Image (cartoon, rainbow, N blue to C red):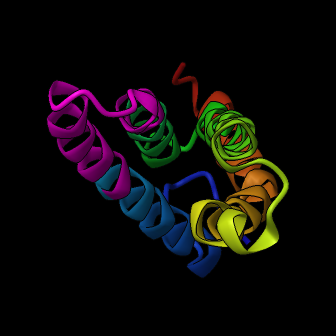
Amino acid sequence: MPNLQGNRTLTEWLTLLLGVIVLLVGLFFVIGGADLAMLGGSTYYVLCGILLVASGVFMLMGRTLGAFLYLGALAYTWVWSFWEVGFSPIDLLPRAFGPTILGILVALTIPVLRRMESRRTLRGAV
């Protein structure tokens, strides 16, 4: 149970770790996606990477906005995947499986992020 003194619970530490992972994946997407876009490839990776970087930063700040940004990026990933390969399960798997698994983990952090936000509000920080 979190307290007002700022001690973090295990679930909060795991949420912050997930935020770091999302941030690093986002940076990888932005850097690699920029190279790909300059070669004439899809801009999906740059746009999705920007969303993931923002998501990771907000998760590290303990904001639920981070989780919702990730879920928005996941929706964008599914739309892009269907647009790129259609409804072929074998072609969708490499594009959507990893982000969806990560999305499930991110969705599970929403209650933790809400608790972190409410604790910050109780301490008077905005």
Residue 124 painted magenta: no
Q: Find residue 39 and report its image quarter.
A: top left
Give the x, y percent position of residue 67.
66, 44
Residue in the foreground of this view, choosing between 115 and 73: 73
Q: Is residue 86 left or right of residue 124?
A: right
Q: How many marks?
A: 0
Residue in the foreground of this view, choosing between 99 and 9: 99
- Above or below, 81 relative to 90: above
Give the x, y percent position of residue 86.
78, 47
Question: Residue at the location (48% across, 31% down)?
Answer: 51
Give the x, y percent position of residue 63.
60, 36
Residue in the foreground of this view, choosing between 106 and 25: 25
Q: Pick out the residue farthest to the top.
A: 126
Q: Look at the image and tell me whether residue 7 can be seen.
A: no
Q: Specify the quadrant that holds the C terminus.
A: top right
Question: Residue at the location (39% across, 32% down)?
Answer: 42
- Above or below, 115 relative to 35: below
Q: Specify the quadrant that holds the N terminus.
A: bottom right
Question: Residue at the location (67% across, 46% down)?
Answer: 81
Question: Residue at the location (38% across, 27% down)?
Answer: 43
- Above or below, 43 relative to 118: above
Give the x, y percent position of residue 95.
59, 60
Q: Magenta part mainly helix, strand or loop?
A: helix
Residue 35 painted magenta: yes
Point out the stretch of residues depicted in magenta.
25-49
Q: Is residue 106 left or right of residue 19?
A: right
Q: Find residue 83 and report its image quarter.
A: top right
Q: In this view, does 2 lie to the left or right of 124?
A: right
Q: Look at the image and tell me whether residue 83 can be seen.
A: yes
Residue in the foreground of this view, choosing between 53 and 17: 53
